[in-house]
Amino acid sequence: MEQYAIKGGNPLVGEVEIGGAKNAALAILAAAIMTDDTVMIENVPDVRDTNVLLQAMESIGVIVNKIDRHTVKINASQIHDLVIEDDYIKKIRASYYLLGALLGKYNKAEVALPGGCNIGLRPIDQHIKGFRALGANVRIEHGLIITETEKLVGNHIYMDVVTVGATINVMMAAVMAEGRTIIENAAKEPHVVDLANFLNSMGANIKGAGTDVIRIKGVTKLHGTEYTIIPDQIEAGTFMFAAAVTKGDVTVKNVIPKHLESISAKLTEIGCEVEESDDAVRVVASKPLSHTHVKTLPYPGFPTDMQPQITVTLGLAAGTSIVTESIFENRFKYVDELTRMGANIKVEGNTAIIDGVEKYTGAGISAPDLRAGAALVIAALAAEGDTTIDEIHYIERGYEDFYLKLQALGAQIEVVNSERDLKKFKFKVVG
Ligand code: UD1
């Protein structure tokens, strides 16, 4: 089984290039099937989640042509099936974006119901409520969500919670619905805006994305386009915290600094220097880190997908910090692993109370999910001694070339496959 072998202690120094946003890519790739023309999408991250979604699309007849590692041409004129099977949904929840895309284009879709996930309950009631408001019948049978209608008609929809997934799914379903749709209490995440811009470049008429009211005027048809996906805010943030935790000096390049404001603000608050330029952010951690309080919130608040990374960082900051998770109820599972590395963190409900320690020490640990896995890697980079991390396939779901990018910043990290590899790694990094 593949593992990361890490020897901690090196400050990360240098520049790292950030790839396209995974979560924007998942929405945009799904939406690309809404026209019969060819669509070209650039800056697609080469990660497991986007590749699995492309496979799911191919399974229903979409022609996917990879031009290079990050550019894909999609033609959906030959779709022969409107059913997305369980295998794909098991591998990635975002396959359910094909529900909104297929419903919007063909007035019918069947997608396996996403199962439980390891960061907490993830209901889909708001997706269903939105589709029904547009006139679709939605029923759940034999593990499938089946939705169909004669035609979709625009409506006024109020989301009961701020949800990225339902905002995206309903936006796709409404784009070719008859008349006007208004989505209130919509999610404002950068990837919601990116999807709206993409759909508009295909001829849709969507206004207000990025605010909490999205207005959509239905159009009869969408056409081909060429589009470049925005940079990944969470990948960038992960490297920014990696710089902080290892007392390094890292410039993350190819980012939109505005999308990183909540992250930059917290880093400044705990004692890092953050310098912004047009499309880069430099994080320098030359002083000891100090404690803070943070609560995860929908954008522009502090992202839940950065919660494990800030918790790992605050674990080494002087004083007591408090991290409150308000989006997903079960997102502190990695704390047990971090405790094995010497962290002093107590979790009570959705709050982590963190008493900063002097240092982490290397241990044999396991990645519980994507973001927590990345956070444990950065903990290991700061730790004294060797760490091995299992289940790294979670990390590969959302980070392209993660360990290679870290190596380029001076980290001692490798993928190992066997005891022998591990021994070789330890021999190499001794000293
Ligand atoms: C997306 C992101 C994920 C991120 C999350 C929050 C993708 C592929 N994934 O997930 O990385 O952590 O946003 O920023 O973009 N909810 C309901 N009913 C629903 C839908 C959601 O109650 O029908 C609740 C959820 O339980 C959660 C909250 O709304 O408490 C936010 O979830 P949502 O924004 O939908 O997350 P995802 O789209 O699944």
Image (cartoon, rainbow, N blue to C red):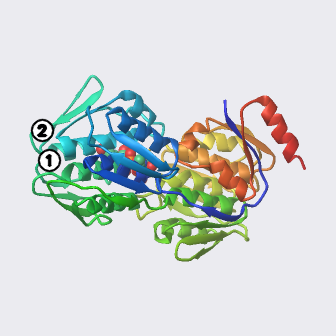
- Element at label 2: loop
Is mark 2 in CB contact (under 8 Å) with mark 1? yes
Q: Which residue is mark 1?
A: 134
Q: Nearer the viewer, residue 5 or 220?
A: 220
Label 1 packing within 10 angstroms: few (<14), some (14-19), many (20+): many
Q: Is residue 401 left or right of residue 45?
A: right
Q: Which residue is mark 2?
A: 149
Q: Is residue 51 visible?
A: yes
Label 2 packing within 10 angstroms: few (<14), some (14-19), many (20+): some
> What is the x, y in percent for residue 14?
70, 65
Q: Is residue 188 visible?
A: no
Residue at (25, 53) in percent of width and height: 171
Quarter of the image with the N terminus is: top right
Dot 1 amino acid type: Leu
Residue at (39, 49) in percent of width and height: 73
Dot 2 amino acid type: Thr
Examine the rendered structure and indicate whether residue 420 appears above or below residue 425.
Answer: above
Q: Nearer the viewer, residue 118 or 335?
A: 118
